[in-house]
Amino acid sequence: MITDLYTERLHLRKMKVSDSSSLYKIWSDPAVTKFMNVSCFTNENQAIDMINLLENLYHENKAIRFSIVSMESNEIIGSCGYNSLDFENAKAEIGYDIAKAFWGKGYASEAIRSLLDYAFSSLNLNRIEAKVAPQNVNSIKLLQKLQFTFEGSLRKYERVDGKFKDLNIYSRLISD
C-alpha cells in the first residue's frame, strides 16, 4: 500500500512508533482533541498504543494514518489518513488533526487534498467520507472549501465520555 505522499510544504509518511513523542504533544492538547473520538492523552504510552493499533489496521488493509511532517522544519505538525478503507465499496473515511500552533495556515487542506488525489487516482476509490461534530466549525469550513457535500446528521452516532453525540457526514465523490 502507501508509503509517502508529498505536497508543496508537507511530507505525509506512514506513522511509526518513533513519532510517539511528537504525536503525544499534539494529542494531549485539549484544543486538538476537543472534537476527536478520543479523550485527551495523558501519557506518551497512549500515543504508542494508538500508533500500534493503527499499524495493525494497516496490516489488515483497513486503515492508514500518516504523520504530517513540515518539510521546512522537519517537525511533525499533525496526522491524517484513511480511518477506514472499504475497497469492496470503493470508499474511505478520512480523519485529520493539526497541532494548534499550525492552525489557519492551510496545512490541513494541503494534506487532505493529497489524500483525495491519492484515493481517487491510485487507490481507485469512488467516495471519501468525513464525519464531523456539528460544533466543529473550522473542520466544516475546511470540508466545504474542499468541495465536500453535506449529506446529513448521524443522530447519537458516537459515545464520547459516556454521552451519545451527533455527527455530520460529508462526502466527496470522484465525479465531484
Image (cartoon, rainbow, N blue to C red):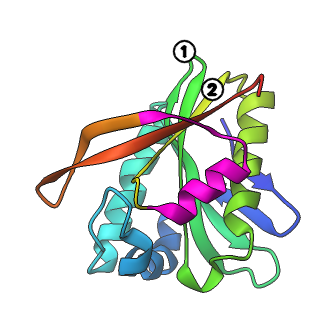
- Does residue 77 lie above or below 101 as drawn? above
Quarter occupied by residue 131: top left
- In the rendered image, the quadrant that contains the N terminus is top right
Q: Residue furthest left?
A: 162
Which residue is label 1 attached to?
89
* Residue 167 numbered mark, or none: none
Left or right of 36, for residue 113: right
**Disc 1 residue crowd, few under 14, some 14–19, many 20+, Cα 10 Å:** few
- Does residue 33 lie above or below 29 as drawn? above
- In the rendered image, the quadrant that contains the C terminus is top right
Residue appearing at x 54%, y 15% in the figure: 89
Is residue 150 inside the magenta stretch? yes
Which residue is label 2 attached to?
127
Q: Position of residue 114 (x, y in %)?
A: 76, 49
Give amino acid for label 1: Asn
- Of badges 1 and 2, nearer the viewer stands 2
Secondary structure category for the residue under label 1: loop
- Asked if the residues shown at circle 1 and circle 2 are in contact, with their CB atoms under 8 angstroms apart, the answer is yes
Camera-side residue of 154 and 123: 154
Q: Earlier in the sequence, mark 1 or mark 2?
A: 1
Quarter occupied by residue 108: bottom right
Q: Position of residue 167 (x, y in %)?
A: 36, 45
Residues at marks 1 and 2, CA–CA distance in whole angstroms: 9 Å
The stretch of residues the image draws in magenta is 136-152
Q: Residue furthest top?
A: 88
Camera-side residue of 140 and 39: 140
Is residue 119 inside the magenta stretch? no
Camera-side residue of 168 and 96: 168
